[in-house]
Amino acid sequence: MKQFKTESKKLLDLMINSIYTNREIFLRELISNASDAIDKLAFKALTDPSVELGSDELAIRLSFDKDARTITVSDNGIGMTEEELDRNLGTIAHSGSEAFKEANAEHQGEDIDIIGQFGVGFYSTFMVAERVRVISRAYGADQAFVWESDGVKGYTISPAAAGERDGENDHGTDVILYLREIEGEDSPDKYLSEWGLRDLVRRYSNYVRHPVQMMVTKSRELPKPEDAGDDYTPQYETYQELETLNSMTPIWKKRSSEVEQADYDEFYTSTFHDWEKPARTISFHAEGALSYDALLFIPSRAPFDLYSKDYEKGLALYSSNVLIQEKCADLLPDHYNFVRGVVDSPDVTLNISRETLQQNSQLRAIERRVERKVHDELTAMMRDDRESYEQFFENFGRGLKFGIYNSYGAAASDLADLLLFWSAREDKQVSLAEYVAAMPESQDKIYYAAGDSRERLEKTPVVKSAVDHGFDVLLCTQDVDEFMFQAMRTYHAAAVAGDSEHKGTDERDLELTNVSTADLDFATEEEKAEAEKASEEHASLFDAMKEALGEKVVAVRASARAGEAPACIATEGPISLEMERIMAEGPDAGMVPGARRVLELNANHPVFAKLVAAQDAGDEAKLALYASLLYDQALLVEGLPVDDPVEFAKNVCELM
Ligand code: ADP
Ligand code: MG
């Protein structure tokens, strides 16, 4: 018996127990080796006119024997000589394939896309096999040799017996795995079945470019006998058929002009288990130092778990058509976590188990390109197919907003123009750019209102008043909206050309402002002067009301903002009523400070005259009652609960 070369026992042990985290990749490795062997023979035929390939199709065959507990992977590729068996399988971390690639480097143009590179993949078989037998006959040789090992002690090589690859032109390799007996979940017994092998091929080797075939058992109905009576029940027979398990053509390698959308749709629905066609398909190809093909999809509907913490984002990563990672998270920014798809690159540097990449900079480069492509596609969709875009935004808009919030506003330069909001004035959704384009010349801020329902927001005094003054207000009803706006602070509006209908404006940064924050003024100068005058004139009235309301408010004052309502609640500082409400439901409830509320009164409203009268009459009790009622009523209009409903009811009765 020969010992493995290199300090190999330890290495082998390391291999089997530490390098791979995933046992089932053994078949991927064997199929990749078989595919390489076929490529090498095809390459030889291409470059050496003396090589004649038989009429047999070059293919990979799988079979299994339940009783003997074996799985066999065969190919009719280039095979190995006795020396090659010794060198390639007897030396761990020696890759005959890598050597082949180097030796033929000058033929790069001829497309030798060999998968092997580390010389360790073969040993992954020992994760599932206690013994491996390799029968190989090199192309052109007239004798096959058998390599055999238990993966621990060493290996033997001997001439093959009669019947083992001794037919004419019987070149190629059989790898026979004698499966380990392991109890429980790790048991390889599940691969001793048609579906078990089919499943592994589909998942890992579906796009390997040579056919992977297996004899499968099928069933068919027998023809109905002529003398069959009315009560004839159909009879069936089982039969064997050679089936190709892999689909071979990686659709992502094709130019989109060569592919029907129906084929993309079919690929998408079957690969990503969605029953609806994708909303958009993006295909692109990069060439150069890092070349890759990418095929991305924007789904038509959100998966049910998109916003749960179990949701895993990522694109499938292939290298030379072999699956490396099912969901490579590094290829997608978080805010595009809904994108599904495939990236395939022969150039990425894989780590030795081929389960991950070694170089993050390559992934980052791909991610950046993916991000740009998705961004451009969404921008085009918004421009050209608004209806679909609104549907998209309904599904995934919240994620875009979180992207801005989570990046502390940094992602806004990419994402802000993809957002849509309901407009208070137009009864439709508008983008920030559209909002800005429709602003009157005097407006220098973007106004929004936040609350839990659009209908209610539309009716609040501040929003009405803003609209009455000719200012549109974005109605925000998602929990993240206002947090996002605070993270953004401003929106960078692009320049508008002078000959457009909206005059010429330079690019500028517009502040995003909640209409109910107290430092806001969209009232006209005249109205403001009036309110200011009222504030001065009635300072003592406001002091008395503030006194009556106590801690509930930080101030009471006159304002032009209440519009036609007698009063409204405004806030000072960064925390609005809506944010207060959202945070009160969050995990940090109780730790965050509340909104600083201001009761604002409309000095032109008839109720105001009553307040003045009560104060003039020195009726403190009545003034306190009015103050409390106005405050509660303003809260109700905002869609907020009154602090003390019993007290509120009592006050209303007292008034009646
Ligand atoms: P890698 O594929 O990364 O080179 P492996 O451990 O998978 O490493 O295989 C080691 C070497 O054994 C290969 O490089 C190749 O030269 C040889 N080999 C393995 N399987 C076959 C096969 N089916 N036919 C011909 N050569 C093979
Ligand atoms: Mg290999």
Image: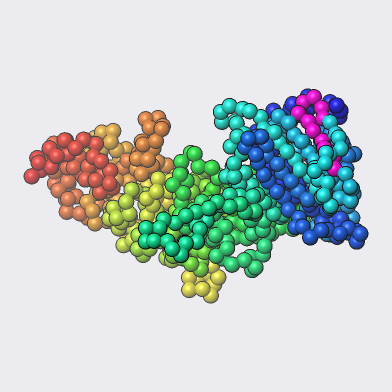
x and y, in percent, of residue 348 in the image:
73, 47
**Is residue 564 among what the camera can see?**
yes
Q: Residue at x 62, y 66 (%)?
A: 259
Above or below residue 23? Residue 497 is below
Span highlighted in magenta in the image: 144-155
Q: Nearer the viewer, residue 113 or 642?
A: 113
In the displayed structure, does residue 492 sit left or right of residue 370? left
In the displayed structure, does residue 283 sit left or right of residue 544? right
Q: Residue at x 28, y 43 (%)?
A: 640
x and y, in percent, of residue 105 in the image:
88, 52
Q: Nearer the viewer, residue 487 or 319?
A: 319
Above or below residue 473? Residue 4 is above
Q: Residue at x 23, y 53 (%)?
A: 565
In the displayed structure, does residue 118 sit left or right of residue 218? right
Asked if the stretch drawn in magenta spans residue 153, the answer is yes
x and y, in percent, of residue 385 in the image:
48, 67
**Is residue 620 among what the camera can see?**
no
Quadrant location, the N terminus: top right
